[in-house]
Image: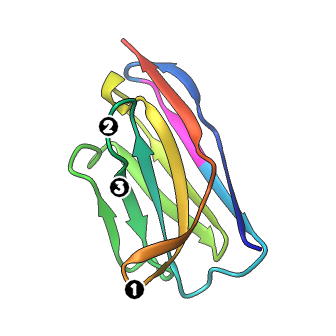
Amino acid sequence: QARLVESGGGSVQAGGSLRLSCAASGRSFASYGMGWFRQAPGKEREKVASITWTGDRIDYADSVKGRFTISRDNANTMTLQMNSLKPEDTAVYYCAAGFLRGEYMYWGQGTQVVVSS
């Protein structure tokens, strides 16, 4: 069974940086897209960024463009570099993998990010 584990969350002051990592195990995600999502209290989950297997297509939510960078080290690891963090970036961040027919097949448990003003 595939498993995704996020790490790197924490608390930081506005303007600071955090680097999230996602490690997948149990199967290879070569040829599949991966992505980062987040969910703030009282809000719906939203996509933050996504990346294809080859990295030839990367998408960002408008709210994070120019501040966040998604990258993929290999088939089963992915990172999200978050700079210039804002209080509105506070959320639980989820890693997703295995993008197929419009949805992700696997999800991590999430890692909390808190940005204080």
- Asked whether 19 falls inside the magenta stretch, the response is yes
Q: Is residue 92 above or below residue 5?
A: above
Asked if residue 84 shows in the view, the reply is no
Q: Is residue 87 above or below residue 89?
A: above
Residue 116, position in %: x, y? 42, 14
Residue 14, position in %: x, y? 38, 19
Disc number at residue 55? none
Asked if residue 55 shows in the view, the reply is yes
Disc 3 is placed on an element classified as strand
> 68 left or right of 19?
left
How many angstroms separate mark 1 from mark 2 (CA)?
Answer: 25 Å
How many angstroms separate mark 2 from mark 3 (CA)?
Answer: 12 Å
Q: Which residue is mark 3?
A: 47
Seen at 38% across and 47% down, the residue is: 68
Image quadrant where one finds the N terminus:
bottom right
Depth check, front residue: 99 or 72: 99
> 65 left or right of 74?
left
Pointer 1 or 3: first along the chain: 3
Tell me the kind of residue under disc 2: Lys
**Looking at the magenta stretch, what is its main secondary structure?**
strand
Disc number at residue 101? 1
Tell me where residue 57 sits by quadrant.
bottom left
Point out the frontmost of discs 1 and 3. 1
| Region of the chain picked out in magenta, as a range | 16-20
> 85 left or right of 64?
right
Q: Which residue is mark 2?
A: 43
- Badge 2 local density, few (<14 within 10 Å), some, or many (20+)? few
